[in-house]
Amino acid sequence: EAQVTQNPRYLITVTGKKLTVTCSQNMNHEYMSWYRQDPGLGLRQIYYSMNVEVTDKGDVPEGYKVSRKEKRNFPLILESPSPNQTSLYFCACGKGALTGELFFGEGSRLTVL
Amino acid sequence: DQQVKQNSPSLSVQEGRISILNCDYTNSMFDYFLWYKKYPAEGPTFLISISSIKDKNEDGRFTVFLNKSAKHLSLHIVPSQPGDSAVYFCAARKDSNYQLIWGAGTKLIIKP
């Protein structure tokens, strides 16, 4: 079954405590991306990767890091989380650049106290 | 600067009737438009798309219309079913890549 798997699905943490949200896809897609969803703002792109070892900033990259050492994995790292990073995070991978169609994980709800 | 706007946060429609979800955009360089559907506790799933060179695309009960002069697109669902209750996101693409600009979403509620 084609899947994008995110972990953890839910996390409550405190300001400054480093955390990593993992994302793994089994569709062999080259493109992967991280989004955050906030009320009234839709989905905003954090970082994306067109291929292994290639990453680029999206619209809201501040406070986040990513890496793409393997095709299937694209972890999102919060080195020093702050309360304004409390959000719902989605990882996605791309089927084909022609249509821009994306496959999403189920989401990770992060609360930073 | 919201380049893609969904001005209705929510919409309630009777089962069996037509649901019309609207989306406005400001950038005439967008070349592809997509609609995604999202249920609670799940990620968005692709629903239907339309290229900027077309004005209509149909897939079963779902039809998307594009009015380029008005910079407006709409998603029609006919007939509406209870399983259509979800949040619908409109997204626009620029420059033939994966970079999408998203609307804020419209929550559709189908009443039995």
Image (cartoon, coloured by chain):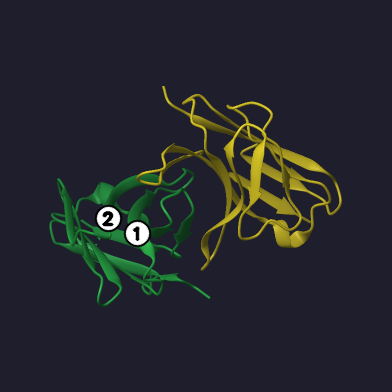
Chain colours: A yellow, B green
- Out of A11 and A104, give the one closest to the viewer: A104
Residue at the disc numbered 2: B51
Q: Residue at left 65%, top 43%?
A: A55
Q: Which mark is residue A1?
A: none
Q: Nearer the viewer, residue B17 or A84?
A: A84
Kindly check if marks 1 and 2 are in contact, taking CB atoms under 8 A apart as contact. Answer: yes
Q: Position of residue B30 (x, y in %)?
A: 38, 63
For disc 2, the neighbor class at 10 Å (few under 14, some 14 to 19, many from 20) is: some
**Kind of residue indicated by mark 1:** Asp
* Marks 1 and 2 share the same chain: yes
Q: Is residue A98 above or below residue B74?
A: above
Asked where in the image residue B17 lies, by quadrant, the reply is bottom left
Q: Is residue A111 above or below residue A23?
A: below
The subunit letter for the residue under badge 1 reads B
Residue B31: which disc? 1
The disc numbered 2 marks a residue on which chain? B
Name the quadrant containing residue B87. Answer: bottom left
Secondary structure category for the residue under label 1: strand
* Identity, as a three-letter code, of the amino acid under mark 2: Ser
- Which residue is at a point 48% across and 31% down the rendered structure image? A29
**Residue A2 quadrant:** top left
Q: CA distance from mark 1 to mark 2?
A: 6 Å
Asked whether A2 or A8 is in front, the reply is A2
At mark 2, the secondary structure is strand
At 34% from the left and 54% from the top, the residue drawn is B34
Q: Position of residue A25 (x, y in %)?
A: 53, 29
Q: Picture coordinates of residue A37 (x, y %)?
A: 55, 57
